[in-house]
Image: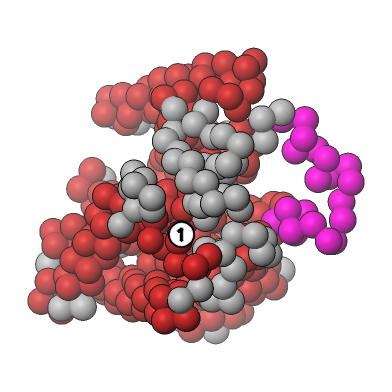
């Protein structure tokens, strides 16, 4: 009851933000009802391009969810106290991201009843089955950890001892959710762009850049609109994580180009060529990929230069560039380009339809609403006199 009261109460600006998100969700839901009536024919998908915006957003958001481990691991295992104020924010971000992942899978199925086939006919040979287990388990783990630690903080007591193994389990589980997602793609030999042994490492590197970059942006935003402060040390440590993860992510992409074009394997070259210069006169994706590349390079210049990284305005710009660059790469390019050319050599380009884009926007609004409410509860707990009288409680048994 206390948490519900904290979630619904707030300033006029807070209520306007909630109303805006609800409107976007309503528009998205209306478009989804139309999709439910007419099927995926109202989207930009086709016989040759069967996965598009929905699955691409799912792939990107799994990485955002997995990135919570980058604050959980240093704080709980290495006693890095600078992350004390932002660990709960990372866990709440993971919860919102996983919920959005599930919603994108749901709308991509066309017929919602098909989702239950994974539950009714489970098989260990299905990667979708393992993906469902990993996402559902990760959501339950983060929800449990966040609820227990937040309640302990509000009551100014140490969390119960049984939460220790749950926290330990959540760390490798975070890695597993994006690894299993990568296996969904790399296990399809007909798509050369995904047929690479480093797809899972690529996913993890980009996740550990995009997720912390978003968390930095959220912390800086909260510092402007509330009395919350993540602390300069925590922000800078996260920025260093983003810098190195982004460097590794760019390096992995360059490795893919070298392997494809040095070996001169046509199937591996075609998709990459379509992404950046076009194929057979079709180059709809090329401007997006060049924008992603420019943003990646510019963000690395800012992040790897200490003078720029320590400037919060430039840091916010760099993190925005990282997030947008990786969203374009994974949220558009990586999924769509794997279907070009088709197994018969045809080039069928894909553009999301307006209803498809509005449904995706509605799901992003739903995730933003969940994140807003969770952050409102967490910050309200910390603003209480009881919570402010002592430093936040933590799982001392892990030290």
Classed neighbour count for the residue bearing mark 1: other residues with Cα under 10 Å, few (<14), some (14–19), many (≥20): many
Residue 181: where, in percent of width, then height? 62, 60
- Snapshot colouring: secondary structure
Residue tagged by mark 1? 271
Image quadrant for the C terminus?
bottom right
Q: Specify whether residue 282 is painted magenta.
A: no
Kindly indicate the quadrant of the structure image that contains residue 234. Answer: bottom left
Residue 273 in sight here: yes
Q: What is the chief secondary structure element of the magenta stretch?
A: helix
Residue 304: where, in percent of width, then height? 21, 78
Q: Residue at x 53, y 81 (%)?
A: 77
Q: Is residue 292 above or below residue 39?
A: below
Kindly indicate the quadrant of the structure image that contains residue 296. Answer: bottom left
Image quadrant for the N terminus?
top right
Residue 259 in sight here: no
Residue 69: where, in percent of width, then height? 51, 69
- Residue range of the region highlighted in magenta in the rendering: 112-131
Residue 269: where, in percent of width, then height? 45, 67
Question: Which one is in front, 151 or 242?
Answer: 242
Residue 335 placement, left or right of 308: right
Q: Specify whether residue 129 is painted magenta.
A: yes
Q: Residue at x 28, y 71 (%)?
A: 239
Kindly indicate the quadrant of the structure image that contains residue 380. Answer: top left
Q: Residue at x 26, y 57 (%)?
A: 290
Question: Which one is in front, 321 or 237?
Answer: 321
Q: Residue at x 83, y 44 (%)?
A: 119
Residue 80 placement, left or right of 66: left
For label 1, the SS is helix
């Amino acid at each position: 009851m206390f948490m519900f009261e904290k979630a619904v109460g707030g300033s006029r600006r807070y209520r306007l933000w909630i109303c805006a998100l609800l409107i976007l969700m309503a528009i998205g839901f209306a478009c989804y009802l139309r999709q439910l009536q007419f099927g995926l024919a109202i989207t930009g998908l086709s016989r040759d391009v069967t996965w598009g915006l929905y699955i691409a957003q799912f792939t990107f958001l799994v990485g955002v969810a997995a990135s919570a481990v980058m604050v959980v691991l240093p704080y709980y295992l290495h006693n890095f106290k600078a992350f004390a104020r932002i660990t709960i924010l990372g866990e709440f971000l993971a919860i919102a991201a996983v919920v959005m992942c599930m919603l994108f899978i749901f709308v991509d199925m066309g017929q919602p009843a098909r989702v239950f086939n994974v539950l009714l006919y489970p098989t260990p040979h299905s990667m979708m089955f393992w993906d469902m287990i990993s996402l559902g388990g990760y959501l339950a783990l983060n929800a449990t950890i966040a609820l227990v630690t937040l309640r302990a903080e509000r009551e100014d007591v140490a969390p119960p001892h049984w939460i220790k193994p749950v926290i330990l389990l959540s760390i490798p589980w975070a890695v597993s959710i994006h690894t299993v997602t990568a296996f969904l793609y790399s296990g399809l030999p007909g798509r050369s762009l995904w047929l690479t042994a480093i797809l899972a490492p690529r996913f993890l590197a980009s996740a550990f850049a995009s997720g912390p970059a978003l968390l930095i942006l959220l912390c800086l935003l909260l510092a402007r609109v509330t009395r919350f402060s993540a602390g300069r040390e925590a922000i800078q440590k996260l920025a260093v994580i983003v810098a190195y993860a982004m460097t590794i992510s760019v390096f992995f992409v360059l490795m893919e180009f070298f392997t494809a074009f040095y070996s001169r394997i046509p199937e591996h070259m075609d998709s990459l060529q379509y992404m950046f210069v076009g194929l057979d006169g079709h180059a709809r994706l090329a401007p997006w990929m060049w924008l992603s590349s420019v943003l990646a390079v510019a963000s690395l210049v800012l992040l790897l230069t200490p003078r720029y990284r320590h400037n919060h305005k430039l840091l916010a710009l760099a993190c925005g560039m990282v997030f947008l660059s990786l969203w374009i790469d994974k949220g558009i390019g990586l999924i769509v380009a794997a279907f070009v050319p088709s197994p018969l050599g045809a080039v069928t380009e894909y553009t999301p339809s307006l209803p498809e884009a509005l449904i995706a926007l509605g799901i992003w609004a739903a995730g933003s609403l969940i994140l807003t409410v969770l952050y409102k509860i967490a910050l309200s707990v910390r603003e209480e006199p009881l919570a402010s009288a002592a430093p936040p409680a933590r799982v001392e048994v892990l030290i």
